[in-house]
Amino acid sequence: MSRTNSKNQLTLMEVNAAQRESPLERELLLHLHALTIPAPAREHRFAPPRRWRFDLAWPELALAVEVEGATYNGGRHTRGTGYHNDLEKYNQAMIDGWMVLRFDSPMIKDGTAARMIADAYALCERTRRMMDNAISRLGIGGPA
């Protein structure tokens, strides 16, 4: 039941996603849009059967972003169990080949996060093009 009759109405899935999105994520998305970075997937699941999700991700580039809210007031990410669980998640992501960038509130608000994501996005795109070219030159991976 995620469809609507009008193009101007949000689908139920989009409404639910927007309700889960933090104000910091919204601000970061606006910064990324201003830098013409393609829209990321939100709440992207990885490492099944684990139920881990990245706040933002570009799965085709294995680039992920985590917005670490409440880092200055004892939020989940800075307390023992939450911090431990985050370490496990981020380490597994890196083992699986993801580049994971983590940002706190000041980095998002002053634009540092968006600039760093733009740099990482460009690096991942260059790397993917180089790999695609190398595979093409070797004749690997094409139709048989």
Image (cartoon, rainbow, N blue to C red):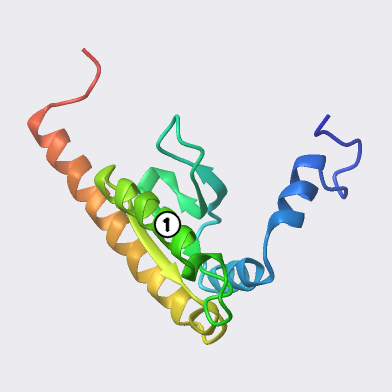
Q: Position of residue 61 (x, y in %)?
A: 36, 49
Residue at 12 percent of width and 41 percent of height: 134
The mark tally for this picture is 1
Q: Which residue is mark 1?
A: 86
The answer to which image quadrant residue 133 occupies is top left
Q: For this view, does 133 lie left or right of residue 103?
A: left
Figure check: 135 above or below 107: above
Q: Nearer the viewer, residue 105 or 80?
A: 80
Report the quarter where the N terminus lies: top right
Q: Position of residue 125 (x, y in %)?
A: 31, 55
Q: For this view, does 80 lie left or right of residue 140?
A: right
Q: Position of residue 72 (x, y in %)?
A: 54, 82
How busy is the neighbourhood of tag 1: few (under 14 within 10 Å), some, or many (20 plus)? some
Residue at 74 percent of width and 55 percent of height: 18
Figure check: 90 above or below 70: above
**Residue farthest toward the right in the current orientation of the protein:** 5
Residue at 28 percent of width and 51 percent of height: 94
Q: For this view, does 21 lie left or right of residue 41?
A: right
Q: Nearer the viewer, residue 73 or 120?
A: 73
Q: Secondary structure at mark 1?
A: helix
